[in-house]
Amino acid sequence: MKNLVDELAKEFSSESHGSSDLHEEQYFVRGASDEEFLPLSHLIKSSEIKGLKELKSNGYVASSLDYLDLPHFDKWWQQQFNRKILQKDRKTISIIHCPDNKKIFDAVEVVHEMYQVLKSHNVLMNGKNLPIQLGEWYAKTIFGLDQKKSSSQRGFDFYFEDKKCEVKVHWHDITSPKGVKLKKSLVEMSDYTIIMYVAKNFMIRDILFLDSDFIIRKFAGKGHTIFLKDSDVISYFFSKSNKHYGKIVNKPSLLKFSTPNLAMSIDEKSN
């Protein structure tokens, strides 16, 4: 599929489309380079690819244009549509791109090794920023989440089929007896809450995918914080239940980046 997409993106980018209304599109698919893109609707029209979900199931992810570092996109846009891209356009545009999972997997292994070296020499005491971003990327690629510029607060929001998701990353080989800490206000603002349990070696050790209303009804008490203890939600873990397997968009990525135990459990329950 990627070869087809790259070919069509190169073909589309080789000529101007100033007389069309394709500049009004919200989704653009990246080709082989940061200088080659094409509108999603044009890709669907020019191939047998049925839509965004099919692309996601083949490893593509969708991210807000403002989230990505694409210095050539503005120039490409102007060349294609004979107009400068406006800030209001940038806020609505998402880029569909295909990461190289093999290179990412290799990098995760190297990062783990380097973290161990830095930790053993007391250079690195707290490296949570990387695991959090990696865990969010895992959620995005596995469930086909759209990552869009937030309209109500700084940063970016995640969406699963137009429903807002709160993505929480827990980085440790075991969960604290208190459980995973969630901000009640963020859960209330979302439709789903996804918790990615990332092991110390940066692989996924388990996943929770829950309705946010369910969390509020069952676990929210007084105050602004919710704690989800393993003992209270263990039956909903991906390693224990296949209830939410239907929400998996990219199973190969899930299996590739899971610990062996989780991968075996998911593979058995989904077959």
Image (spheres, rainbow, N blue to C red):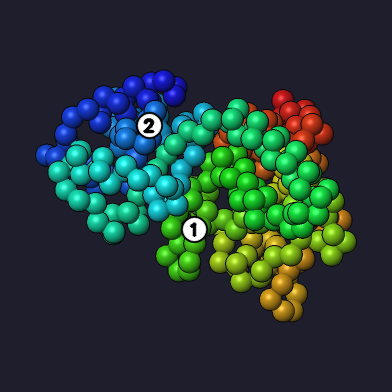
Quarter of the figure with residue 103: top right
Reading the image, the residue beneath label 2 is 33
Q: Are marks 1 and 2 in contact (CB under 8 Å)?
A: no
| Residue type beneath disc 2 | Ser
Numbered badge on residue 156: 1
> Is any part of residue 26 visible from this angle?
yes
Q: Nearer the viewer, residue 240 or 172?
A: 172
Q: Which mark is nearer the camera, 1 or 2?
A: 2
- Residue 28 in percent (x, y) is at 34, 40
Q: Residue at x 39, y 49 (%)?
A: 65
Q: Secondary structure at mark 2?
A: loop
Q: Residue at x 49, y 39 (%)?
A: 61
Which of the two residues, 241 or 252, is positioned nearer the viewer here?
Answer: 252
Q: Residue furthest bottom?
A: 223
Q: Residues within 10 Å of mark 2 (few under 14, many from 20)?
A: few
Q: Is 7 rendered above or below residue 244?
A: above
Q: Give the mark count.
A: 2
Q: Toward the viewer: 41 or 112?
A: 112
Q: Amino acid at mark 1?
A: Phe
The quarter of the rendered structure image containing the C terminus is top right
Q: Secondary structure at mark 1?
A: strand
Residue displayed at 24% across by 56% down: 86
Residue 121 screen position, x and y as percent: 81, 50
* Residue 214 horizontal side relative to residue 66, left or right: right
Q: Nearer the viewer, residue 202 or 218?
A: 202
Q: Earlier in the sequence, mark 1 or mark 2?
A: 2
| Image spot of residue 48 (x, y percent) | 37, 22
Left or right of 248 on screen, residue 67? left
Residue 265 seen in render:
no
Q: Residues within 10 Å of mark 1 (few under 14, many from 20)?
A: some
Q: Which quadrant, please, contains the N terminus? A: top left
Q: Position of residue 178 (x, y in %)?
A: 84, 65
